[in-house]
Amino acid sequence: MRMYDIIKKKRDGFSLTKEEIDFFIKGYVDGSIPDYQASAFCMAVFYKGMTEEETANLTMAMAESGDTVDLSVFGTLTADKHSTGGVGDKTTLIVAPICASLGCVMAKMSGRGLGHTGGTIDKLESIDGFNTALSPEEFFAQVEKTGIAVVGQTGNLTPADKKLYALRDVTATVDSMPLIASSIMSKKIAAGAKNIVLDVKCGSGAFMKIPEDAEALAAEMVKIGKMCRRNTAAVITNMNRPLGNNIGNALEVIEAINVLKNNGPEDLTSVCLALATQIVSITKNISRDDAEILTKDALQSGKAYDKFIEWINAQGATENSLNFKKADYSHPVIAETDGYIISSDAEKIGISAVILGAGREKKDDTIDMSAGIILNKKTGDKVTKGDVIATLYSCNKSSFESAKNKFLDALEFSQEEPTKEPLIYKIIK
């Protein structure tokens, strides 16, 4: 078998066999297939696409290219949630303890943030003492005892995806539906959960900007999951504005705790309940209506918060660890006009938080865990000139001017009240 023939076959629009896809992934990981041939392969897929069977085979080949996690010891109740990324997206901190309190096994690996999107592991590490680097033995023992553990991704999880993504990033082949879907799903398959719910973000702060594209990606990933023998569903959620009111690592943990104490913002609470409901429904094989009753009760009764405390205790933190250090400086953002906020570009607001120190522009950047933004006003709210519409937090006072300008650039005002957008666009099963 030759890589030349595989590239030519895909270039000419023919479907590849499982053996041909396996040959490509194995050869690219071990170095026998060079970057220039892998680039040609990605470009051929970009233009010619892949069938559902091809995409599923590519997903499995990437999932099996490195370490995999075998969660079969926990039976059929293992569950995972993946978000395609957004600003203020702290849903795992809320959804995981809700589901674990109801008997779902939440054995999860998460990533760090880069660019305007914050990572779950960064948020958890803002909790003093929280250990995200459990050994495999510690990970399994904790899941056995508490039903929940969240750790950083192993260095050898899906090495094929890591290599391919870096290549796609510099060869203008990122925007390919089969390559995006297989990249995301390969990591979820390798992580071992039987039940997977995908939170596909849509809007200005998301990779997919319009609902049609988000729906196409969600449908592709759900099909892949099912073909790989995983119970899979997707919830398409709005990311035209930040989720919740707090942006930044410690600030987002504080807001997640508020939700678990039944005192959080309505939008964040609603999205988390929708995701938790879908996880409980497919994991326990019950209707969405029955699952919704259970998830709402877990939140309102305090069961979910109790599970959250049990979880952080198991990973080295205590309830006292939730007394977070405050940023050295704060700065108000003042409304410069009267009217309604008719849009707030989530990506620009996320970049504003990065400027303050809450995120990374490069992999080795250090994060200021106390930095971030608290929103006093959001899309749809009426403001008067002089109102405080947000407060910026940072340990770097010199960052405020640039961050404020980027934040204000994200907002659009009008004298007419905007139409309210849905939080949940669609559920795909």
Image: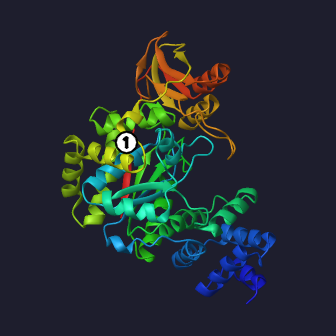
Q: Is residue 284 left or right of residue 195?
A: left
Residue at coordinates 37% horizontally, 42% vertically from top-left? 422
- The residue where tag 1 is placed is 422
Residue at coordinates 32% horizontally, 52% vertically from top-left? 276
Residue 11: quadrant of the picture: bottom right
Q: Is residue 163 left or right of residue 37?
A: left
Looking at the image, which is closer to me, 45 or 129? 129
310 relative to 71, above or below: above
Q: Amino acid at mark 1?
A: Pro
Where is residue 152 shown, x and y percent of the image? Answer: 53, 55
Q: Is residue 89 visible?
A: yes
Residue at coordinates 78% horizontally, 74% vertically from top-left? 37
Secondary structure of the residue carrying numbered label 1 = loop
In the displayed orientation, state which residue is furthest to the top.
Answer: 386
Looking at the image, which is closer to me, 355 or 149? 149
Where is residue 335 shown, x and y percent of the image? Answer: 51, 15
Q: Is residue 274 left or right of residue 391?
A: left
Where is residue 341 shown, x and y percent of the image? Answer: 47, 24
Please state, as top left, top right, bottom left or bottom right, where the C terminus lies in the image. Answer: bottom left
Q: How crowded is the residue under tag 1: few (<14 C-alpha within 10 Å), some, or many (20+)? A: few
Please state, as top left, top right, bottom left or bottom right, where the N terminus lies in the image. Answer: bottom right
Where is residue 363 shown, x and y percent of the image? Answer: 67, 47
Q: Is residue 428 visible?
A: no
Q: Is residue 125 left or right of residue 174?
A: left
Residue at coordinates 26% horizontally, 60% vertically from top-left? 103
Residue 309: quadrant of the picture: top left
Q: How many marks?
A: 1
